[in-house]
Image (tube, helix red, strand yellow):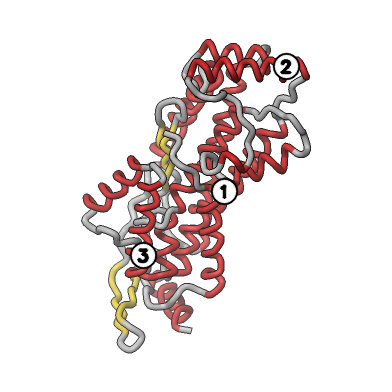
Amino acid sequence: PAKQKFQRLLDQLRQQGLIAAIRGTTDSLTIKVFQKPQVKPSRKIINLGLFLATVITVFIAGYYLWTTGLFGSQVLQQQLIAIVDPTANPYLKAGLFAGGLLSIIGLHEFGHKAAARHHKMDATLPYFVPGPPPIGTFGALISLKSPPANRDQLFDLGLSGPVVGFVVTMAVAALSVLIGFLPSASQATQLTQWSSTCGAQLGVSGCLSNIDFSIWPSQPLILIIISGLTSSVRPGVFLDGQLFFAAQIGALLTFLNIVPAWQLDGGHISRAVFGANGHRVASVVGLLLLFVSGYWTFGILILAFMFFSRRGFAGVEPLDDISPVSNSRKLLYVLALVMLVLTFAFSPF
């Protein structure tokens, strides 16, 4: 097949410091050979510095989460701690949150890195981005320094990160149940009273709710399913809030990445499956999904990147943009759609 022949040509040209791109239609093809751009080695000290800074900011966010809580009231949070775990070490709780969240984000990026290495694409180590509480980070990214050879490689590059992040998110969510607090009858009564008091102060029905299908789409389906399955092992368990919040963020990041828009992971996948024209349509649909579900800030940010990059809806263009993606990857596209549905939730902000 032409795809494999062109791949062999690329391998031969790389040995001579050259690279090629194939363009046109199935009736008229043009192969352009040119000098392979020199790739400057990335400064790994920057990657390390950003990672260490992000570890600190995520740890601070975890400490804030345990001592102040998502409700922003230290008094309410301390009342809750007095019921569920009065002897807990706040630094260990902060570390638990940091470990859960950084595992999701870091392994997501190393999923991309592994795919790039497998296909002999040059890519940097992850650049972590520190941020303020209550999350402590804006995520991470890797920079691709050489283009994918074909649509198969582009597909693998886009899907690898979300799949790994999705699996780790499920593991963190399950762990939040398995190490959660199992209240006694008196503690359960105290928790019910605390929830009512907290709800009255915040103007809501209550601050504790069951993680079941009735709350979708306020919570992602995958977290509802995982929580339900693992809770059956420990009925009445009180989820570990530090880990479950990390899982919530992991599901959110997976959803935002798998949206089929621009050069997001989902954009790479749709570009590989549908080509340039189909990718533009998918990007419009993806942006509409972001706006309808309340992620206005992220949607506007994507539009800004599209405008200032002067590439508009254009995605990453493989060297061989003629050969279609393999049939097996077309089937795997269903997996991307399933992940999109399972991680979807209306914006909590």
For residue 150, side relative to residue 36 (left or right): right
| 239 shown above or below 91 | below
Disc 1, SS? helix
| Disc assigned to residue 279 | 3
Q: Which element type, helix, strand or loop, lies under badge 3?
A: helix
Above or below, 320 against 59 in this view is below
Question: Mark 3 vs mark 2: which is more N-terminal?
Answer: 2
Mark 1 vs mark 2, CA separation in Å:
34 Å
Q: Which marked residue is nearer to the observer: mark 1 or mark 2?
A: 2
Residue depicted at 37% across the width and 58% down the height = 285
Amino acid type indicated by mark 3: His
On-image quarter of the C terminus: top left
Residue type at tag 1: Phe
**Disc 1 and disc 3: Cα gap in Å?**
23 Å
Give the class, few, some or many, for how many residues have Cα within 10 Å of label 3's Cα (few <14, many ≥20).
many
Question: How busy is the neighbourhood of tag 1: few (under 14 within 10 Å), some, or many (20 plus)?
Answer: many
Res. 128 mark:
none
Viewer can see residue 191: yes
- Out of 126 and 243, give the one closest to the viewer: 243
Mark 2 lies on residue:
187
Q: Amino acid at mark 2?
A: Gln
The disc at residue 166 is 1
At horizontal 47% and vertical 62% (from top left) the residue drawn is: 120
Say which quarter of the image contains residue 315.
bottom left
State the image coordinates of residue 306 (x, y, percent, origin top left).
Answer: 27, 53
Q: Position of residue 79 (x, y in %)?
A: 60, 12
| Residue 321 drawn at (x, y percent) | 37, 73
Q: Residue at x 37, y 56 (%)?
A: 261
Residue 77 occupies quadrant: top right
